[in-house]
Image (spheres, helix red, strand yellow):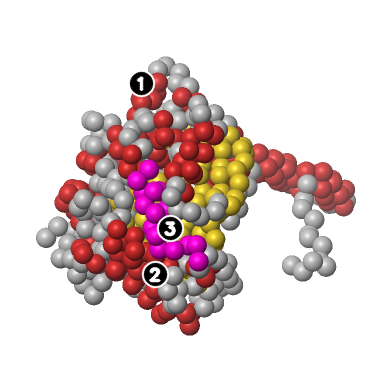
């Protein structure tokens, strides 16, 4: 409809009554039986209209979108436009029942299925050319309290921003999930998400009580299964597989239930208080932005590597569970020198004792002995502002956003040789302003959980490193991919080009998937990709795969493999 057109008037109850009355009057000269039939028909019509109004809008879906449909091109493009699939059908669903039917249809027809919640994915897991049916879960976005499970329900299509807003506005609680509000909860939660409150409250999966998953039995029957962390739940291993096992491995998650383990006793009460079932959200956050200039004379290798080492060393010393500093979260964003500046973001609950002094002391220790001038500033803002601000954490061109990400966990600081490698690549002539890396504070309460308690194997770590390149044009793919791959390979050259678990590194993070780790051209370590992601927990994930996806319906480039 163009802007000049007027929408057609919707029938109201008064319109229906007037029409019925006029029709009855117009038929006054008709036989008595005819008039009586017309008046009798008007009554059910009015009642039906009123009943429809009480029911509200028609539930969403399913919507089947095929090539040639005006919606198709918009729906095939995901967040990373390096990968655009061409499925025969996109099925947009709005209920668990619709998911079951879509999966059943795919299995019956022998069509490869891909599942997308609507957020981010570094690789082509939902755009693989072999995918013929793409399942879009974005309308499944409800967030609320479930009195039956006595936990908070989050559907996979809900963005983290929606999760934060709803939990905070309704109950004043939150979860220690990611800092990008556009990320979909579906893949984020199942991969073991983390964010600004994780050093204080742990990984998000440490608060995962249960999941509802559409699985496919050995005979090809699709069905929905509920699995919880209750010790006597016969489906408990399916719950465990979703506490860091990564998306697209076992089935389609249609519901997550969140409740902190410490709140299990509260949940067993006759009338549990939902406000006590998840961590309380901060009222305000103290945020500091610190900036340094890439100055040819002053930002020397010594100055830069001192700063990066300081950041890492602070996290080595202040990442024990329960430490006062565990409430402080920092991200050091090291952009290529062509960006002119690099920066650090620091966040802390403004209500914590001595929060401002903690931030000031931390910034001072990071910059100590560098000789570099600091820029930036700080502010105290309401909790929801930084966690739901549109565009927070997004980079690149919204029209043609392309990127490559790689990652590694850190038990301690980079070695001196690794620090020099980072400096050399950030100051070379092949990088652009879209090239760089992040070093992210981790540890704290994450380290209080035993590795086998969840599928997140890397518990004794204090930082995550993220290597990335973001660009706009397809013609620049090779240059940007080469830059980030060269940086990564050289940082880990002593261990075959990948972060093999050891004294410094501890593998990688499945929510930053990197298909290069499964490519012998880039991983020459002899350590398989699944060890880098899952370590000793991989055989257990394989057993879950064998039970819940014995036909290997759900698979992608880094999916859990069926045991031999």
Relative to 104, 296 lies left or right: right
Majority SS type along the magenta span = helix
Q: Nearer the viewer, mark 3 or mark 2?
A: 3
Q: How crowded is the residue under tag 1: few (<14 C-alpha within 10 Å), some, or many (20+)? A: few
Residue 272 is covered by the magenta coloring: no
Of mark 3 and mark 2, the one earlier in the sequence is 3
**Rendered view: 494 above or below 29:** below
Q: Residue furthest top?
A: 270
How many marks the image carries: the answer is 3
Image quarter in which the N terminus is found? bottom right
Q: How crowded is the residue under tag 2: few (<14 C-alpha within 10 Å), some, or many (20+)? A: many
Q: Which contiguous range is marked in magenta?
A: 297-314
Q: Residue furthest left?
A: 564
Which residue is label 3 attached to?
303
Which residue is label 2 attached to?
425
Q: Residue furthest bottom?
A: 475
Viewer-proximal residue among 243 and 203: 203
**Rendered view: 155 above or below 393:** above
Q: Nearer the viewer, mark 1 or mark 2?
A: 2
Which residue is label 1 attached to?
265
Labels 3 & 2 near each other (Cβ < 8 A): no
Q: Nearer the viewer, mark 3 or mark 1?
A: 3
């Amino acid at each position: 409809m163009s802007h000049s057109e007027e929408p057609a008037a919707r029938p109201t109850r008064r319109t229906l009554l007037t029409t019925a009355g006029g029709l009855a009057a117009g038929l006054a000269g008709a036989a008595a039986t005819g008039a009586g039939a017309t008046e009798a028909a008007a009554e059910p019509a009015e009642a039906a209209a009123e009943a429809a109004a009480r029911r509200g809008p028609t539930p969403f879906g399913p919507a089947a979108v095929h090539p040639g449909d005006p919606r198709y091109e918009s729906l095939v493009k995901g967040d990373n436009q390096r990968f655009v699939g061409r499925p025969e059908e996109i099925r947009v669903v709005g209920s668990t029942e619709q998911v079951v039917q879509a999966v059943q249809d795919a299995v019956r027809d022998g069509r490869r299925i891909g599942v997308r919640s609507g957020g981010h994915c570094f690789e082509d897991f939902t755009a693989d050319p072999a995918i013929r049916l793409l399942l879009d879960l974005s309308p499944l976005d409800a967030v609320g309290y479930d009195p039956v499970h006595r936990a908070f329900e989050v559907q996979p299509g809900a963005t983290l921003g929606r999760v934060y807003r709803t939990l905070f506005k309704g109950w004043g609680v939150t979860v220690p999930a990611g800092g990008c509000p556009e990320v979909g909860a579906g893949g984020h939660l199942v991969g073991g998400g983390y964010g600004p409150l994780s050093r204080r409250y742990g990984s998000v999966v440490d608060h995962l009580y249960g999941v509802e998953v559409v699985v496919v039995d050995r005979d090809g029957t699709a069905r929905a299964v509920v699995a919880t962390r209750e010790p006597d739940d016969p489906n408990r291993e399916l719950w465990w597989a979703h506490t860091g096992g990564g998306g697209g491995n076992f089935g389609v998650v249609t519901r997550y239930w969140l409740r902190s383990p410490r709140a299990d006793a509260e949940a067993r009460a006759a009338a549990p208080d939902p406000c006590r079932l998840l961590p309380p959200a901060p009222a305000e956050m103290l945020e500091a932005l610190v900036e340094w200039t890439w100055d040819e004379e002053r930002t020397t290798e010594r100055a830069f590597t001192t700063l990066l080492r300081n950041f890492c060393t602070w996290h080595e010393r202040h990442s024990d569970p329960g430490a006062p500093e565990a409430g402080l979260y920092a991200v050091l964003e090291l952009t290529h020198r062509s960006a002119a500046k690099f920066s650090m973001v620091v966040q802390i609950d403004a209500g914590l004792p001595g929060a401002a002094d903690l931030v000031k002391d931390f910034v001072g220790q990071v910059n100590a002995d560098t000789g570099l001038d600091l820029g930036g500033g700080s502010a105290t803002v309401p909790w929801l502002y930084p966690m739901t601000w549109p565009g927070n954490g997004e980079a690149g061109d919204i029209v043609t956003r392309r990127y490559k990400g790689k990652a590694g966990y850190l038990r301690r600081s980079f070695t001196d040789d690794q620090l020099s490698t980072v400096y050399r690549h950030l100051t070379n002539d092949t990088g652009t302003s879209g090239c760089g890396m992040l070093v992210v504070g981790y540890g704290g309460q994450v380290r209080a959980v035993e590795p086998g308690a969840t599928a997140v194997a890397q518990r004794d770590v204090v930082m995550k490193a993220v290597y990335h390149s973001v660009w706009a044009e397809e013609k620049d793919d090779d240059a940007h991919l080469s830059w980030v791959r060269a940086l990564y390979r050289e940082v880990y050259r002593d261990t075959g080009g990948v972060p093999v678990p050891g004294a410094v590194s501890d593998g990688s993070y499945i929510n930053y998937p990197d298909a290069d780790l499964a490519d012998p051209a880039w991983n020459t370590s002899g350590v398989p990709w699944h060890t880098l992601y899952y370590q000793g927990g991989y055989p257990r994930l394989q057993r879950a795969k064998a039970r819940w996806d014995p036909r290997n319906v759900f698979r992608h480039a880094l999916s859990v493999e069926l045991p031999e």
